[in-house]
Amino acid sequence: MSARQLMVAGIGLLLLAGCGKEINRRQAVYVLVDTSGTYAKEVNKAQNVVNYLLGSLQPGDSLAVGRVKSRSFSEKDIVAKVTLNMDPIQANGQKRKFGEEMSAFTKSAKGSSGSRYTDITGGMMQAAEFLTETGAHTKTIIVFSDMQEELDYKTVRDFPIKLDGIRIIALNVTKLDTDNVDPRRYVSRLEWWEERARAAGATEWRVVNDLEHLERVFSGRG
Amino acid sequence: MKSLLFWPEQPLLSLLVLLAIAVPFLYAARAPMQDFIARLTRALSNPMRLGSHWLARTATRLQVRNREVLFAHGGRELKLSIEREFERVTTLVERDLQGYPAVQRKLMDEITHIEEDYKRSSEVPPPPPEWVKAIEELAKIKPNGDGVVERILADIRDSLDKIYQKVVAQYRRAYEERHNILKRCLPFWRSASQTLTQVERNITGLQDSAAKIDSNVSRLEGIFATRSDVAHALTSSASTQLFISGLVMLIAFGGAYVNFKLISLPMSAMVGGGDYVTESLRASEVAALVIILFETLMGLFLMETLRFTNLFPLGSVTEKMRRRLMWVSLTILLVLAGVEVALAVMRDLIISADVALKQTLGGGGEVAAVEAGWVTKIPTVGQMILGFTLPFALAFVAIPLEYFINSGRIVLGATLVLFLRGLAFALRFSGQIVKEAGKLAGVFYDVIIFAPLAIERWVAAARENAAKDSPARPRPALGKFATADNEEAL
């Protein structure tokens, strides 16, 4: 085969490479915002995280924000959700709309007194359901909470949950007054959640309290 | 290892004792061991020698083939060069010599004009009239005081003065006319001079082309004669071409990269921004790459149909089809350049929207529209111009590409010959080293068993001396010494 024929064949192969099977590299992120009790005042920080995500997500990615309240396993608790269009200009418009919805939610959450109980497990189950439906390659639940679950006597959550293929990031896990008295409570609470998440099939468990360097958490695509 | 030593705390002594035990066995195994070493070295060195021979022969064959390719390539280049020179000569001849009869006619006319005018200007003034002699005779008459004669003479003088003035005026007029004729000649002279200069220039151009043709023909003769100096010249020329074309292609790659960066983002609006073809390669990036490669391909076809390059075998294509192909390539290239202009505008739109969104999300609220002066449009216009010009610039990459491929073949062949020869030398050298190492191992073996060997030599010498003492009785060999003694005893 002469050099010329080789060159032509190479160009042809390169052109054919573009027609291969597509690889799913889409991301789906579910931000679970705790609006119970005193944590409701932290909702501003949650908005900053969502804004960061809006700036970094690519066309085709999905984002949803759900609130954690007394019982959170409900579609009604999804504040806003979007799957970005493949066209970057349209995706830009969707991001803008999502930002407005999140802003409205922040205002309303700050104005309210906060729920009496905290159903984090229910919120996680709802998030897992949403993320699985997106069919994204990388699925992430960001839990913006102090991770102190409190349930009323009627709510049942003491059963194994399924978080297969999902990574969990607990953001801004604030210390409670009781944690200050005995820090072991804080450590054991986080350990309990990690154990539960791993048992549920989560691929990763991380606790991040420094919100200044979110790019380290979301660097790369899966 | 330590288990082999009799006294591990005294390794040297243990080794010496081991050696002492081993020496008789080594002596007994000397002949087969020497044979083994010799065979082993032969088994290693012979394939190396054969491999070296094969590589050297291959290198020679490759060199011959390279030479053929080199001469063929050089010959083709020279033939093309000669053809171009002939085309130039033909153009010159057609342009200038076709009009030569007209030039000649013009020159002849001008020369005729000049000749006529020269003749007219060289006309001598009319000879002095006949009456001058009569006047001379009258002038000889001496004044004798006669009033009549004096009056006649005065009349004659007056008449002569008048005639003289008239003649002088006529003479001056004649000269003025001749000067005027010569003045009218000037443009003809100039024109003739210019025509001749032009002819001279054309002839010089022809002479230059002829000199080039001569030079190329003599080089071609050298190629046909497969002269070594021509081969060296062609190889070094190919190396230079490879370097220059490589440099130009590197610059072209830079241009292609800029082009890629320019269109990969807006392509996401056409093929989807979140689709991936491989783990890290987006579909939009592949699409941008395909567009750039397509532009390059159209450039290759354009250059090919314009006969700037000769990469594809288009010899069987008719001239009409070639022209059609050229127009098709040019049209596609123009369309792609137009697409790139549109993509450049879209890129600007996407970036502006993204910046605005980030500002909004950053807490700045709705950003007031910036005063859109003409200065703010410079980047957009710049991107549009780049988007339009880069495809055409990429089209020219076909020319260095052809030189790169052709010269690369020659340089690669020459490098391969060098490599093969180097490898052949290394193999031959290694084979020789193995051979010598085998000999050295045999000698070293003998050094280890020097004591029994010395005894053997001593015994052999003793036997020889004994044989000299009794020459009538032949002595058997060392191995049969005991048997012979027994026979003697019997």
Image: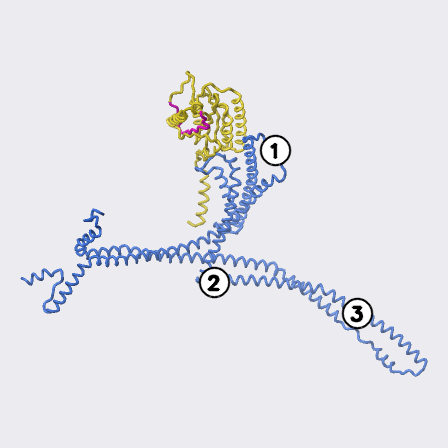
Chain colours: A yellow, B blue
Q: Is residue B8 above or below residue B452?
A: above
Image x and y of residue A175, in percent: 44, 25
Q: Which residue lies furthest to the top in this view?
A: A154
Q: Residues within 10 Å of mark 3 (few under 14, many from 20)?
A: some
Reading the chain from its start, which is encountered first: label 2 or label 1?
Answer: 2
The answer to whether mark 3 and mark 1 are in CB contact below 8 A is no
Image x and y of residue B445, in percent: 22, 57
Q: Mark 3 points at which residue?
A: B174
Q: Which mark is residue B221?
A: 2
Magenta part of the chain: A160-175
Reading the chain from its start, which is encountered first: label 3 or label 1?
Answer: 3
The answer to whether mark 2 and mark 3 are in CB contact below 8 A is no
Among the 4 quarters of the image, the one containing residue B456: bottom left
Q: Name the residue under label 1.
A: B369
Q: Which mark is residue A124?
A: none
Q: Which residue lies furthest to the front in this view?
A: A181
Circle 3 chain: B
Q: Is mark 3 on a helix, strand or loop?
A: helix
Quadrant the C terminus of chain A occupies = top left
Q: In this view, does B297 lie above or below A62?
A: below
Circle 2 chain: B
The alpha-carbon separation of the residues under discs 2 and 1 comes to: 74 Å
Q: Which residue is drawn at 54% across and 42% down?
A: B336
Q: Please name the amino acid that badge 3 sits on.
A: Ala
Q: Residues within 10 Å of mark 1 (few under 14, many from 20)?
A: few
Q: Please name the amino acid that badge 1 sits on.
A: Ala
Residue A170 within the segment the image draws in magenta: yes
Q: What element carries label 1?
A: loop
In front of the other: label 2 or label 1? 1
Q: How crowded is mark 2: few (under 14 residues within 10 Å), some or many (20 or more)?
A: some
Among the 4 quarters of the image, the one containing residue B109: bottom right
Residue A220 within the segment the image draws in magenta: no
